[in-house]
Image (cartoon, rainbow, N blue to C red):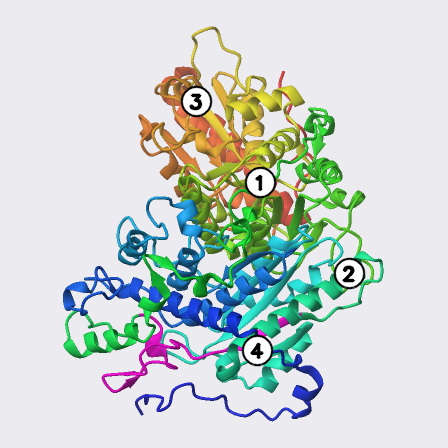
């Protein structure tokens, strides 16, 4: 049976079987409060002007003020944009302006979840003068500025169809849906005077990131942080289907969100939409201030019910009702371009003319400027307007520095990178009590970073043992929430750290990419300032997830970061605890990057002193003379062994130790790479080693054997473009794993000391006659040792006791 068309606009939800008392007991009905007639008229004028602009941006390439009859020549050749969400976004924008005007002490950011509603945001930004401020000479409050905004939208050189970093007031990339709500909560943390209003589309509300972010109120301490006004915009439709929330009646929605911890106000009467929405926003602000006042006076409300608004308006409201017999307003047909053939067919061109003329733009724009009736609702202080809040474009707060060298450890010992780093971060948090946070998916202690908790606590407001204590750590078992909180916190000027099991960072792969795209564009926008880098600490790596099994063995997030633009991507694999400390210290100071730092939580060998680690990390790679064969000046090795990553570097060093014993004639050079990006060709990354430095480390023509933490193809791609790469071979994670022992994981993936030694003998023998003569005997000894270890593991269920002894060279 074929699908049938929905026969009516705005189809109602089927009634639920929930008791009617839910609405009486739980929903909010603020006292009706009429708006002053002048304000009501101004709201409606602003909405008409913005809706006209939004619609005309999608369609018009000329005649933007309709001073002549509309013709096919006035229509853009490619019609791009999303109309359906725009009227609701404009409605909210107009009311937030009035809320700001009427509350002079209010600082607000507006986050738009349906980021494809860029025409609505841009229209409002032009009307309030924010585009003129940030793009003088292009989008001025003049007929020329009006024309440029309309005609350049979604064409090369103009604004794109989605909200991005070029949009004043925006701190959220409007591509992938789902994390606007989480970013809003991250933005208000440690900003006690900030309110973020976030519109969540009802399609977006079906996503996993949004579903978990509703719980963010449980991590918001009203004593120290600002607040969020979530507006769930229910227009009923996605691209071609009804939404879940559009098919829920008021009782179901109120019951759901009341259970989450909200007070729910439903705004849906179209005849009173302006009075009800403005009254609802004033109610929400009043509830926020009541909750905050109690907390800041030492009488915090336990489990406060924070305000939220559910806004029901038709999709594509004020647009065409029907086109060619199909319902448009109140239907999915209004989602993108309601009149796709306006440039070709007279009927649709006529429909467009009627639609645009209905806004009476000539009454609202005089001499290229919005009239006083349009602008009366705006805050008088321009810097308080939604597009000009400084927190959205120049917010960076530098951290107070802490000397990382005070936390370094003695070389020659075994130390956990994470335990040592935890002690350092504990001090960083003490010195910066309001400008750094750690967001972790319930793994802080497992990842051995628990020293952070020596002087701070977790921040979970619904837990009587960790509420209202100023804790710097938020643990929530949602990587989506951690990522979104980190983004909002960073984009409003602070610094954040996101530690995670290696295998689960891939959950936020696309969120990380979207964020990095925002920052890439932000770096190209002259009026945007610096931001702290976002910092991922990746531990519990595949090499030591032998106890959890194959599902926990996945280093693919490295490749996700490598695919970013070179200006943003930074991947570090420090080889020991001191290098890890140095790297974390560097990353916390850095700006505008996506930093990925990979290390071990288990105790591993410390090779370098504090000063040696600092120099090694500065260079990004170095020859480890202590593990290399002593050579005469100008003498070259037979083979170069390269470790990249904690555990695989340990295997390289142990291979060098083994070769010193069983094949002393083989001249071995050991190199460690801690900054992965130095290996890229010079033209591909700013950290890339010069040709001369690269050859100094890796020689002109000797075999180079990489033992790499990640997937071999990642490193092979990075090396592509270097000279004579045919002499280089890469071993890394092969997607082999199970519940086994740590050393057996090395064997299974071909990166153990025995695998490295075997490769070294085979490759190094080609230029060394002594080694060539004894090659088979040495390879036989390697195989004998492999079998001995395998038998021990199979018999005892553990690795031999001496497997992880610190390497020694004589």
Tell me the number on the disc at residue 396: 1
Q: Nearer the viewer, mark 1 or mark 4?
A: 4
Q: Residue at x 30, y 58 (%)?
A: 150
Of callouts 4 and 2, which one flags the residue occurring earlier in the amino acid sequence? 4
Q: Which residue is mark 3?
A: 639
Of callouts 4 and 3, which one flags the residue occurring earlier in the amino acid sequence? 4
Q: Is residue 770 above or below residue 196?
A: above
Tell me the number on the disc at residue 276: 4
Q: Residue at x 64, y 77 (%)?
A: 264
Count neighbours of disc 4 (C-alpha within 10 A) and say few if under 14, some if 14 to 19, many if 20 or more: many
Of callouts 1 and 3, which one flags the residue occurring earlier in the amino acid sequence? 1
Q: Is residue 119 visible?
A: yes
Of callouts 1 and 4, which one flags the residue occurring earlier in the amino acid sequence? 4
Count neighbours of disc 2 (C-alpha within 10 A) and say few if under 14, some if 14 to 19, many if 20 or more: some
Q: Which residues are magenta?
A: 307-336
| Position of residue 522 measured from the top left corner of the image (x, y, whole percent) | 44, 44
Give the quadrant of residue 5.
Answer: bottom left
């Amino acid at each position: 049976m074929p699908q049938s068309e929905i026969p009516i606009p705005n189809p109602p939800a089927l009634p639920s079987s929930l008791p009617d008392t839910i609405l009486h007991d739980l929903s909010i009905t603020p006292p009706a409060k009429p708006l002053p007639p002048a304000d009501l008229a101004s709201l409606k004028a602003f909405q008409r002007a913005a809706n006209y602009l939004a619609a005309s941006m999608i369609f018009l390439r000329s005649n933007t003020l309709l001073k002549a009859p509309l013709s096919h020549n006035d229509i853009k050749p490619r019609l791009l944009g999303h109309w359906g969400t725009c009227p609701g976004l404009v409605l909210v924008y107009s009311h937030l302006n009035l809320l700001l005007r009427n509350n002079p002490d209010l600082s607000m950011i507006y986050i738009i979840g349906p980021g494809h509603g860029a025409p609505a945001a841009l229209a409002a930004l032009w009307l309030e003068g924010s585009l003129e401020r940030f793009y003088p000479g292009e989008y001025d409050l003049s007929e020329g500025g009006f024309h440029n905004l309309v005609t350049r939208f979604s064409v090369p050189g103009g604004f794109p169809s989605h909200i991005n970093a070029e949009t004043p007031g925006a701190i959220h990339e409007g591509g992938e849906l789902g994390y606007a709500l989480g970013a809003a909560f991250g933005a208000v943390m440690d900003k006690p005077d900030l309110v973020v209003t976030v519109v969540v589309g009802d399609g977006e509300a079906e996503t996993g990131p949004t579903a978990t972010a509703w719980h963010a109120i449980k991590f918001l301490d009203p004593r120290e942080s600002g607040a969020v006004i979530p507006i769930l915009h229910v227009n009923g439709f996605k691209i071609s289907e009804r939404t879940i929330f559009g098919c829920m009646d008021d009782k179901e929605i109120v019951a759901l969100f009341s259970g989450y911890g909200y007070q729910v106000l439903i705004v849906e009467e179209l005849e009173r939409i302006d009075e009800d929405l403005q009254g609802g926003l004033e109610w929400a602000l009043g509830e926020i201030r009541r909750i905050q006042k109690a907390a800041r006076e030492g009488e915090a409300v336990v489990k406060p019910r924070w305000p939220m608004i559910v806004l029901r308006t038709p999709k594509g409201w004020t647009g065409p009702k029907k086109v060619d017999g199909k319902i448009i307003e109140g239907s999915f047909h209004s989602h993108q371009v309601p009149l796709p053939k306006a440039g070709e067919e007279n009927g649709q061109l006529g429909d467009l003319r009627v639609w645009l003329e209905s806004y009476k733009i000539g009454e609202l724009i005089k001499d290229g400027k919005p009239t006083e009736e349009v602008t009366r609702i705006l805050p008088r202080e321009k810097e308080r307007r939604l597009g000009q809040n400084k927190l959205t474009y120049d917010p960076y707060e530098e951290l107070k520095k802490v000397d990382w060298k005070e936390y370094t450890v003695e070389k020659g010992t075994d130390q956990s990178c994470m335990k040592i780093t935890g002690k350092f971060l504990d001090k960083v948090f003490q010195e910066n009590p309001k400008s750094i946070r750690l967001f972790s998916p319930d793994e802080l202690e497992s990842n051995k970073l628990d020293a952070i908790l020596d002087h701070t606590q977790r921040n979970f407001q619904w837990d009587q043992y960790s509420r209202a204590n100023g804790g710097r750590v938020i643990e929530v078992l949602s990587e989506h929430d951690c990522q979104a909180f980190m983004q909002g916190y960073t984009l409003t000027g602070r610094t954040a750290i996101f530690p995670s099991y290696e295998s689960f960072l891939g959950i936020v792969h696309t969120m990380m990419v979207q964020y990095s795209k925002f920052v890439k564009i932000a770096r190209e926008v002259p009026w945007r300032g610096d931001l702290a880098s976002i910092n991922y600490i990746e531990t519990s790596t595949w090499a030591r997830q032998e106890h959890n099994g194959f599902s926990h063995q996945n280093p693919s997030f490295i490749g996700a970061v490598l695919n970013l633009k070179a200006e943003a991507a930074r991947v570090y694999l420090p080889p020991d605890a001191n290098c890890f400390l140095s790297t974390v210290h560097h990353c916390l100071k850095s700006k505008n990057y996506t930093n990925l730092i990979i290390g071990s939580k288990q105790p591993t060998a410390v090779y370098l002193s504090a000063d040696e680690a600092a120099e090694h990390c500065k260079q990004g790679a170095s020859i480890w003379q202590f593990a290399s064969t002593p050579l005469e000046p100008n003498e070259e090795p037979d083979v170069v062994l390269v470790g990249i990553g904690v555990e695989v570097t340990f295997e390289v060093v142990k291979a060098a130790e083994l070769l010193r014993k069983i094949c002393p004639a083989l001249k071995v050079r050991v190199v460690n790479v801690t900054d992965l990006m130095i290996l890229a060709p010079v033209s591909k990354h700013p950290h890339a080693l010069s040709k001369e430095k690269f050859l100094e480390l890796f020689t002109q023509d000797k075999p180079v054997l990489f033992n790499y933490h990640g997937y071999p193809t990642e490193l092979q791609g990075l090396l592509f473009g270097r000279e004579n790469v045919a002499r280089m071979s890469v071993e890394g994670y092969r997607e082999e794993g199970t519940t086994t022992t740590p050393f057996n994981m090395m064997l299974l993936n071909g990166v153990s000391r025995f695998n490295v030694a075997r490769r070294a003998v085979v490759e190094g023998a080609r230029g060394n006659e002594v080694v060539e003569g004894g090659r088979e005997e040495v390879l036989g000894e390697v195989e004998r040792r492999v079998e001995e270890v395998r038998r021990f593991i199979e018999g005892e269920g553990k690795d031999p006791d001496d497997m992880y002894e610190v390497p020694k060279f004589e």
